[in-house]
Image (cartoon, rainbow, N blue to C red):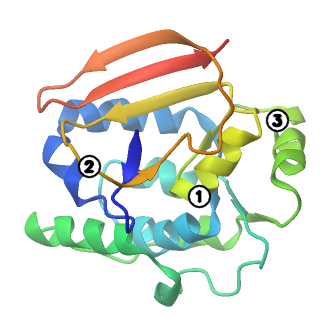
Amino acid sequence: MFVSGPNGEIDWLFPSMDEKAAQWTVDLISQAGLHIMGSRTFHDMAAYWPASKEVFAAPMNEIPKAVFTRKGINVVGDRSKTTTALKDAGQMMKEQNLSFSETAAMESWNSALVLTGDLAEEVKKLKAQPGAAIIAHGGASFCQSLVATGLVDEYHLMMHPAVLGKGLPLFTKAEKFALELIEVKAFPKGSVAHSYRVK
């Protein structure tokens, strides 16, 4: 299972996204008490969501965030640290005649919790705190490392009808483990959401 092309490309997933698939995703991420991510994804999202009018923007901007990084975060929104995924998302917005409009949402990104310690230990501390679910966002390297900790309780995966041939996988660092199916939901343009609980 690939989460992006070999260079982080995500342009292949946009053609199969539709309103129902988007709403499923919004409903899921809106349940979070905390969004966690690696530093590259954090820079992409901080450069994108505060100015976006997409349906995902409100939960992404309003819910607290934590970023895992060994080097710390110097400048939030620094576009020199963004990736191919941000370029692909920007191209999609251009093709759909959407545009950025600056908002006050940048504050939630500026106040993100920055965690520089051992990933497993930091995640254990976060999970021990009261509150709603913690939802993790890619990129591939961060998610591979997170999976390898064995601390993920559920996987909510959106499958898109596209064959990449090669790309960045999700489970490359994982030991073998079993999953229990919670839900499968298909959407009009062919994407399918699979939700699993770790046994």
Looking at the picture, which amino acid does disc 3 mark? Answer: Lys
For this rendering, which residue is in front, 84 or 18? 84
Please report whichever mark, 1 or 3, sits nearer to the chain's N-terminal start.
3
Q: Circle 2 sits on which residue? A: 165
For this rendering, which residue is in front, 136 or 23? 136
Q: For residue 116, which quarter of the picture?
A: bottom right
Q: What is the secondary structure assignment of the residue under circle 2?
A: loop
Q: What is the secondary structure assignment of the residue under circle 1?
A: helix
Task: State the count of labels.
Answer: 3
| Label 2 Cα neighbours within 10 Å, binned few <14 / some 14-19 / many ≥20 | few
Query: Residue 24: image x %, image y %?
Result: 35, 29
For this rendering, which residue is in front, 184 or 102? 184
Q: Circle 1 sits on which residue? A: 141
Q: Is residue 89 above or below residue 73?
A: above
Foreground mark, 2 or 1, reads: 2
Q: For residue 57, which quarter of the picture?
A: bottom left
Looking at the picture, which amino acid does disc 2 mark? Answer: Gly
Whether tag 1 and tag 3 are in contact, CB under 8 A, the answer is: no
Q: Indicate the quadrant containing the C terminus: top left, top right, bottom left or bottom right.
A: top right
User: In this rendering, would 159 be left or right of 63?
Assistant: left
Q: For residue 37, which quarter of the picture?
A: bottom right
User: In this rendering, would 119 be left or right of 184?
Assistant: right
Q: Is residue 45 visible?
A: yes
Which residue is located at x 71 percent, y 41 percent?
Answer: 148
Q: Is residue 16 above or below residue 179?
A: below
Q: What is the secondary structure assignment of the residue under circle 3?
A: helix
**Image disc number at residue 127:** 3
Looking at the picture, which amino acid does disc 1 mark? Answer: Ser
- CA gap between label 3 and label 2 equals 36 Å
